[in-house]
Image (cartoon, helix red, strand yellow):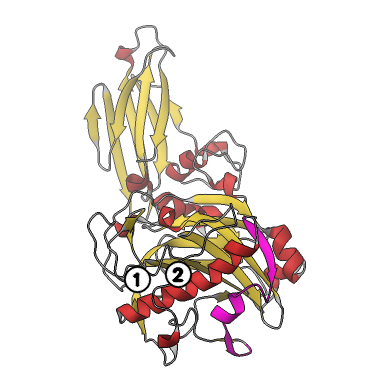
Amino acid sequence: MKHLYSKSLLPGALAVCLTCTAVQAQNTFYAPGDLVLYFQKEGSSNTVYANLGSAAGFRGTAAGAADGTNSIDFLNINATLTSAFGAGWASDTQVYAGLAGVFNSNSSNSIVTNGDPSRTLYVSASRESVGTVGEAASTGYIVNTDTGMSAGANGMIVQNNAFEVNYNAAVVLSTTPPSTITSQNPFLVAGQQGTAFNIFGAGVQQVGTAGSFGTFGDAGDVEFALDLYRITAKNAAGQVAGTPRNGSYEGTVTINNAGKVSFVAQGASSPYDTWMATFPSITVPADKLASADADKDGLTNLMEFVLNGNPSLSDPSIAPTLDASGSNFVFSFLRLDASETGSTLSFQYGSDLSGWTTATIGATSSTVGSAVITVLENGAGADTVTVTVSKSVAPSGSLFGRLKVTQP
């Protein structure tokens, strides 16, 4: 369950401009409303800006949008982070990362841009643990007042304007000045974040750890995991749904130790992803895909998921077996319970390899055409499934059978 944390506008925040707008862009790799991933290190004048593209493109299904898709390894910022903080940046416990994006801070207009009304904030929260991939594992945000929304928007614009007007690249190593990352994300004392963007009292960044943060779905092992929240200031015609001033979790931006950036969208982790996460030795994101064959045994990861296999260990013996000793062809195999909702399984048979009859295998025993499907529940263990087809359907004496599995 996600908990919301109310952060009040601090004294002095009223002194900021309440109608600031982004200045004319000079950076052709940045536009107002883009989501910026940024880094700073305590005691260092170096900071790093990385433009991730339109913040609205990172809306997850929580906001009622169709945008919520994963983007794995879509940007590599290792070289810039190494230049800024040294080759050991990934295990440096004084390096902080955060996310911020806003289109404008105008409090009076009702213009909707990319589905977001004016002053819609996109901001990170430090993920407290790996938790469940696709669900928040952080303290979310409630901004109590419209003045607070304006203050937060102004602070983000000030920070991102420095990136916008002083550079012409998507990823840059900056200094302070002209960087304003440090001023918008100050520290109270060493190791303790101050108020970010004039409004978020406990800060919005995550600090690095000496080791891996953990394995995070398709993104693999990561060093940083930043939950992204969308906070709308108002309701306006034509906007993507959102409760004003209440942050909705949209997904998680991760950075691995090779500097590769990924986004894992909001949404319950699929049974397949949950299963794959139990094999931590598979670290390459491409090897985690359902279509991959990580252990090179001729069975895709998705098929191993269904057959209760181990995708990190070659074991062709989990494939269906055939008993043709009697009057029937009897195909047998084990099926993992979790795969019943995480995939669609069918048995296909035919007397040659050019025509197939398909029988969908459900959660319980059934008869589909000439195929008698028997499902034996084994408690918490994998089901034993048999598919029996009479030899009479194969006058030539030969019958071919195969399993087909797809994800919904």
Quadrant (top left/top right/bottom left/bottom right) for the N terminus: bottom left
Check disc 1 and report the residue beneath it: 247
* Quarter assignment of residue 132: bottom left
Query: In the rendering, at what x and y percent does residue 385 appear?
Result: 35, 38
Q: Residue 123 bears which disc, if any?
A: 2
The type of residue carrying mark 1 is Gly
Q: Nearer the viewer, residue 387 or 214?
A: 214
The vertical placement of 53 against 36, above or below, is above
| Local secondary structure at mark 2 | strand
The vertical placement of 298 against 204, above or below, is above
Residue under the point 42% across and 62% down: 103
* Quarter assignment of residue 400: top left
Residue 339 in magenta?
Answer: no
Residue under the point 60% across and 56% down: 27
Residue 181 in magenta?
Answer: yes
Residue under the point 35% across and 71% down: 247
Marks 2 and 1: in contact by CB < 8 Å? yes
Quadrant (top left/top right/bottom left/bottom right) for the C terminus: top left
Query: In the rendering, at what x and y percent does residue 44 appear?
Result: 72, 79
- Along the horizontal axis of the image, is 138 left or right of 50? left
- Along the horizontal axis of the image, is 339 left or right of 318? left
Q: Which residues are magenta?
A: 170-190
Q: For mark 1, does the 10 Å Cα neighbourhood hold few (<14), some (14 to 19), or many (20 or more) residues? A: many
| Local secondary structure at mark 1 | loop
- Can residue 277 be seen here? The reply is no
Q: Residue furthest front?
A: 24
Q: Mark 2 or mark 1, which is nearer the start of the sequence?
A: 2
Q: Nearer the viewer, residue 364 or 74?
A: 74
Task: Tell me the distance, in whole angstroms, between the alpha carbons under discs 1 and 2.
Answer: 9 Å
